[in-house]
């Protein structure tokens, strides 16, 4: 499975360099990208729920460590030569599982989000709306700036998708809430134009 790397301001060549570095680290560690990501997911679960009674799973710990090392290698390789004040602290390294959403450019992601409004958010409980919202904001360097706005998009989509459970409530206000959330995301992520 392929990897996807998101680093605001990075060129396609820098992204490719970062992905290659991550792949080399995973290969040296003896893990596929899927195995390492699974290990990271398991260890993250321990952080949330506590370590299971049987103790720590050495395989998951090793796989998670390899994923972390791959992320660090991707950051270093991608941002090699960047001024220190421009280098991000972390990068977003992910498995490529939904290319249409994960690789969508800003305008395509906005169009896909708006298209889903007309389907009343059906099938959007998969988290695809969040992926698309983050793709809209992919070039925003300060991710904290848009985190709450992206959260508003996903909450609005969730309410719309669950509206079938409350057929007595009008659906149009829920559709409008999604439109408003998407419009706010679009406005917050627009690049200023210089004239």
Image (cartoon, grey):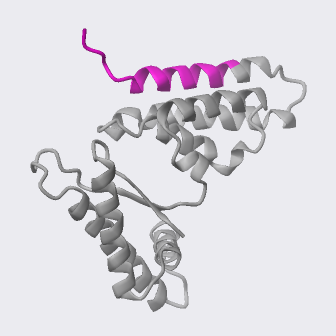
Q: Quadrant of residue 189?
A: top left
x, y percent for residue 91: 32, 56
In percent of width and height, residue 17 lies at 29, 62
In x, y percent, where is residue 20?
34, 69
119 over 95 or under it: above or below: above
Q: Is residue 189 magenta?
A: yes
- Residue 26 appears in which quarter of the rendering? bottom left
Q: Main secondary structure of the magenta part?
A: helix
Q: Residue at x 40, y 33 (%)?
A: 146
Query: Where is the N terminus found, in terms of image quarters?
Result: bottom right
Q: Which residue is most to the right? A: 168
Report the residue that reaches farthest toward the top.
195
Q: Residue at x 52, y 29 (%)?
A: 107
Which one is in front, 28 or 88? 28
Judged from this view, the residue extending furthest toward the front is 13
In this rendering, position of residue 81 left or right of residue 113: left
Residue sitting nearer the eye, 51 or 62: 62
Q: Quadrant of residue 124?
A: top right
Q: Nearer the viewer, residue 1 or 51?
A: 1
**Image coordinates for residue 37, horizontal then vertical, percent:** 48, 72
Question: Which quadrant is the C terminus positioned in?
Answer: top left
Query: Which residues are drawn in magenta?
Result: 176-195
Query: For the point 40% across and 40% down, which residue is it?
Result: 138
Q: Is residue 152 magenta?
A: no
Left or right of residue 189, residue 113 in this image: right
């Amino acid at each position: 499975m392929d990897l996807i790397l998101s680093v605001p301001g990075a060129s396609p060549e820098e992204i490719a360099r970062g992905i290659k570095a991550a792949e080399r680290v995973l290969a040296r560690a003896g893990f596929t990208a899927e195995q390492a990501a699974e290990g990271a997911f398991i260890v993250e679960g321990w952080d949330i729920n506590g370590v299971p009674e049987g103790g720590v799973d050495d395989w998951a710990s090793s796989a998670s460590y390899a994923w972390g090392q791959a992320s660090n290698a991707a950051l270093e390789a991608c941002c090699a030569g960047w001024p220190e004040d421009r280098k991000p602290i972390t990068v977003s390294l992910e498995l490529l599982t939904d290319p249409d959403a994960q690789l969508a450019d800003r305008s395509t992601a906005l169009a896909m989000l708006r298209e889903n409004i007309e389907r009343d958010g059906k099938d959007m409980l998969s988290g695809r709306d969040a992926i698309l919202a983050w793709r809209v904001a992919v070039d925003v360097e300060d991710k904290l700036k848009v985190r709450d706005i992206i959260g508003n998009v996903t909450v609005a989509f969730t309410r719309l998708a669950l509206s079938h459970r409350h057929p007595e409530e009008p659906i149009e206000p829920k559709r409008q809430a999604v439109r408003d959330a998407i419009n706010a995301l679009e406005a917050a992520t627009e690049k200023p134009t210089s004239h």
